[in-house]
Image (cartoon, helix red, strand yellow):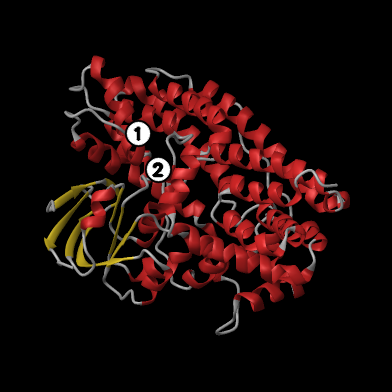
Amino acid sequence: MHSFDPPNLKPLSPVLSLIPRTLLPWIAEKHTKYLDDRIHKIDKLTDYLANCDPVASERQEFISFVDGWTRRESPDLNTYLQEYSKRFHAVRNQVEELCDRVLTDETLWQSRSELVMFWRNFTYINEIDSLHGMFLTSGRWYVNAMLPVVKVLVYCSLPHEVDAFSRNELSYYIARRVITPRFAEVPNDYDHSWERRFAALFIPILQYYDRKLLFLFNVMAEISTKEGQTLTEFVQDVADSPQKYSMLLEQGIYPPFAWHELHASRRPRRASIDYTTATKPLLNKIQEESRSRVQEALEMLAVFKEYELNYNNYNYKGRFGLVSKYQYWQTAKLINPECRDKFLDAILLDRFYDALDVIEHTFGGAQ
Amino acid sequence: MKKELVGISASPGRAEGQVHWILTPEDMKSFTVGEILLAKMTSPDWGEIFQKAAAVATEQGGMLCHAAIVAREEGIPAVVGLGPELSEVKNGSMILVDGDEGIIKILEDKIQ
């Protein structure tokens, strides 16, 4: 198998040295508010993501790409992952380039027409980036990049009594139901017992990866904080004593973005499940001739989870969370005061084209 | 309303309890240990709620969503992707969340 692992995240220390220290509490507060507010307006968020007109053709193309691979009876998962990986890296590279510009190009804040151009590009890339990173937020969108892999696992684990003719279609529906139920339309005679059967086999595998994904609980539990410490105090502590948090900062994780985990991590955790135990129930149910396909799909699952660990969870990881908020703050300063809240509200609700509208309305073609 | 709703098994086990919807940040403050968390979706900042909840049921999301991941980690039953019908289950109703079967059963409906 090719190596599809995403590149490691860059250390955050250089980023922190470029962002004004006085801005860090604002960034942390907005980040927390972003998490708090958006979940209570999930329907609006989902609708926007699924219907954002300026990227409609890109969305449809990506849906066709994933859905087409999911429908195939014997997909070459290696090729799928290769194609997906190319798309993913291309988008992420553009995001990283935009981050570089925000951090290092002072002229961006001096020319309003440049800033408008930048925001048009940023808004577009930001939406495309969301399309390509659909691993976790499965309830919010039509497809999920892991669908073809999960479908192979379903297909190979169905018992012999499911005939060859209906096996492919049934596997497709089950995969769609367990990963993207909101958008899964199933026939009237669809039997839910098949998906329950698969879920029981799949849950231990997910439990193995959940623990990797939630590794911050362990890390944050080791950080000593004062009783009743506020988010702002935590931000200041990270800025004052970066060496204390260097393990996280070097991995591209900004500790204040994991503020909620800090409080939830104080409880002892159960022992994690090992890989052999996790995969045994599924492997016990497959036929010998399917073993190599299942092994390949399980390896793919690992790769996708690595993508998730490194990038998609950018609530905490990578410099985008920090850099983008610096970008919003810098931009907000230049926007008419009466439009500033409207701009920030749009950003906080992921409605970037609405935010762009405020920018274009404010700056127009001004120099 | 229906006495049973079908969703997706996301975390195994069964638990009974009183429904507590979280639709606004204020709803989080009154959440007590042993209640059943109902939500459209959940968020990373709800960690402490998961530690109090006996089980979780959500309208949206599949086996890979946040609610599913955290429920598995906390070892509490979860059924996700129950759809908009879940909103008909009122606060205070007694329900059973069956994470093995991917269903919830309304044991005692609270009329509001």
- Chain name for mark 1: A
Secondary structure type for disc 2: helix
* Relative image position of residue A160 (x, y in whole percent): 21, 22
- Image point 63% across, 50% down: which residue? A355
* Relative image position of residue A172 (x, y in whole percent): 33, 27
- Image point 49% across, 57% down: which residue? A38
Q: Quadrant of residue A286?
A: top left
Quadrant housing the N terminus of chain A: top right
Pick whichever of labels 1 and 2 is earlier in the sequence. Answer: 1
Work out whether residue A91 or residue A123 is closer to the camera in this orientation and state it: A123
Direction from residue A50 to residue A170 in the image, left or right: left
Amino acid under disc 1: Arg
Direction from residue B104 to residue A182 in the image, left or right: right
- Image point 29% across, 34% down: which residue? A284
Find the distance from the CA under tag 1 to the CA under tag 2. 26 Å
Amino acid under disc 2: Thr
Q: Dot 2 surroundings within 10 Å: few (below 14), some, or many (20 or more)?
A: few
Outermost residue on the bottom side: it is: A227
Q: Dot 1 surroundings within 10 Å: few (below 14), some, or many (20 or more)?
A: many
Secondary structure type for disc 1: helix
Q: Which residue is mark 2?
A: A276
- Chain name for mark 2: A
Give the numbered dot on residue A176.
Answer: 1
- Image point 48% across, 19% down: which residue? A76
Numbered label tally: 2
- Callout 1 touching callout 2 (CB < 8 Å): no
User: Can the viewer see residue A1?
Assistant: no
